Image (spheres, rainbow, N blue to C red):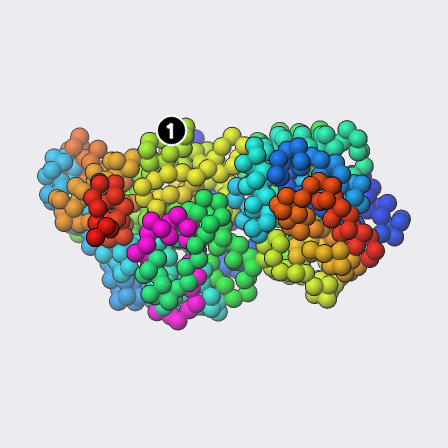
Amino acid sequence: MANDLPNSFMTGPDEKGRFGDFGGRFVSETLMPLILELEQQYEHAKTDQSFWDEMDFLWKHYVGRPSPLYFAERLTERLGGAKIYFKRDELNHTGAHKINNVLGQIILARRMGKTRIIAETGAGQHGVATATVCAKFGLKCIVYMGATDVERQAPNVFRMKLLGAEVVPVTSGRGTLKDAMNDALRDWVTNVRDTFYCIGTVAGPHPYPAMVRDFQAIIGKETREQIMEAEGRLPDTVIAAIGGGSNAMGLFYPFLDDKSVNIIGVEAGGHGVNEKMEHCASLTGGRPGVLHGNRTYLLQDEDGQILEGHSISAGLDYPGIGPEHSWLHEIGRAEYVSITDKEALEAFQLSCETEGIIPALEPSHALAHVTKIAPDLPKDHLIVMNMCGRGDKDIFTVARALGWDIEGG
Amino acid sequence: MTRIDDTFARLQAEGKKAFVAYVMAGDPDYETSLEVVRGLPGAGVDIIELGMPFTDPMADGPTIQLAGQRALEGGQTLEKTLQIARELRKDDDTTPIVMMGYYNPIYSRGVDRFLADAKEAGIDGLIVVDLPPEEDEELCIPAQKAGLNFIRLATPTTDDKRLPKVLQNTSGFVYYVSITGITGAAEAQAGDVAPEVARIKAQTDLPVIVGFGIKTPDAAEAIAGVADGCVVGSAIVGEIAAGRTPVDVLSFVKGLADGAHRA
């Protein structure tokens, strides 16, 4: 592959929506005209200054951007190696990076005259962000959420309802994120005229992977400016957790052409990447296939049936990964590793104790990998980790895992 | 000429509309499913659509989703689905078999290997829901080269500007999806369907078959009356789900086929 490497890693996708062999538009004919229209509208908005002016205004005054780049001093001391920064996207309104993308898609939906917004959600963060922005603009919002996730993410279900969204528990399949995405697609196919599908990650048919990446790239753009200000140079390593991969793609994208920057994505290793598929590490434990409109690495059996993974984090519990990650993996521009539930829980506690930050379980996976590599790196090695969500939603899950009873009383 | 072309030529000579029946391969188990498939030609079915079960059938309603789950839980695989076709071909060399489903199980097997196996098993055509014309190079063009028809879905959202693109690499027949939505949902209305069929026929000589939302013999007659034939899937699968015996299922199918053939 090395001989075929492009001059820039930032030119994708091509006109067919491909990153190398990954991506594409694998949808039913009913949806095809809709995604072509979306692509056209997005291409137009992308170069329209008034679109970005509206985004910038809301990012600043509604979301609270830019999010800080924070030197995690006690954690750095504790690990005794590389200098660790957190990109604090957990401080955004609604508590995660998801709203960066939702704002972009909802502004686009309004421009397209759509009045009904549908979304899928796993951990509930994307659902909450979508319900929030819909409330702000007075749009009808329907969120599909796997019945299993409705149960384990009750606080976010309640938030969505408070925000006026209808939450539809999905019982088909095993009732997790991929099933929620199937039902959202079924809704879209049925309500094509007035409905906009707000996808929460860098997956789905083209143009979603590129569009969501572009909206999340604000994370990496800010990080570049902030690290230049703080250290006068680029980071040596950027690292982020990956379910579908939107926070990671947002952080990575502006650094893809900076060869000195190591890029590491952390997948959910669950109980360990094994043959029983008790994990959600699509790149480490899967192979290429076609699902939800794109070709990418998937957890699947030998007959091409999609497998359900396992992760303690509902936000990482997806059998696929954004197609651009699959491409970056194959060409070797980014490195992908996996972290187990147990390691993530330890990192969760470490962040609480050393930095006073209760992280979501998703970035706890990224942090766990930081704790593995930082001690062996020199003190002038700069790591930026995306703290993409806060952990309020996860305290019940963590309490259960640690054997504390906080629900009984 | 494939068996599909021969069938439409015969029906035209007889002045009859086509009745297409969909069943999920391996639902509820391999043996029962094989017995139903074997009985379909005798029940008046002109073309058999054999569903390939998939874990994530994004364009299907609950009835077909559950049929796929039953089949997979019963151990159905793509190989066993091909085997059903081989078994049928032992005593039926005229009824066309169209495999219908999603791309990933085919992609997983490998396109070239799948096409060779399908041809050898006596398959005549493919309907793959998540392969629009934009992805023709994946399977559609290789399938045509291998001598299999690739049957495309046209939908209410396929406007006149897009229709030529949809028809371009379609062969065998055009499958018009009568509603925007998933299988087994809203009821198709002949009044809505007729102008759409005319719109498609203005741009192609291929037969136009209408599916989605046809549940009764009367509906089959009404819809087939404004097209070259109709497809019934969820209603038949619903009978299987209700635990009816193959004999009863086939008697239900015969009612639908008679309806379509009255048109």
Q: Chain of mark 1?
A: A
Left/right placement of residue A265 relative to residue A37 reads left
Q: Position of residue A115 (x, y in %)?
A: 47, 68
A119 up-or-down from B44: above or below: below
Residue B37's x, y, as percent? 72, 38
Query: Residue B255: horizontal and vertical position, in percent?
Result: 77, 51
Residue interval drawn in magenta: A136-156
Is any atom of residue B85 visible in this view? yes
| Quadrant of the drawing holding the N terminus of chain A | top left
Marker count (numbered) = 1
Q: Residue at x 50, y 43 (%)?
A: A291
Left or right placement of residue A338 versus residue A144 in this view: left
Reply yes or no: does residue A141 show up in magenta.
yes
Residue holding disc 1: A274
Q: Nearer the viewer, residue A226 or B142?
A: B142
Magenta stretch holds residue A180 = no
Mark 1 secondary-structure assignment: loop
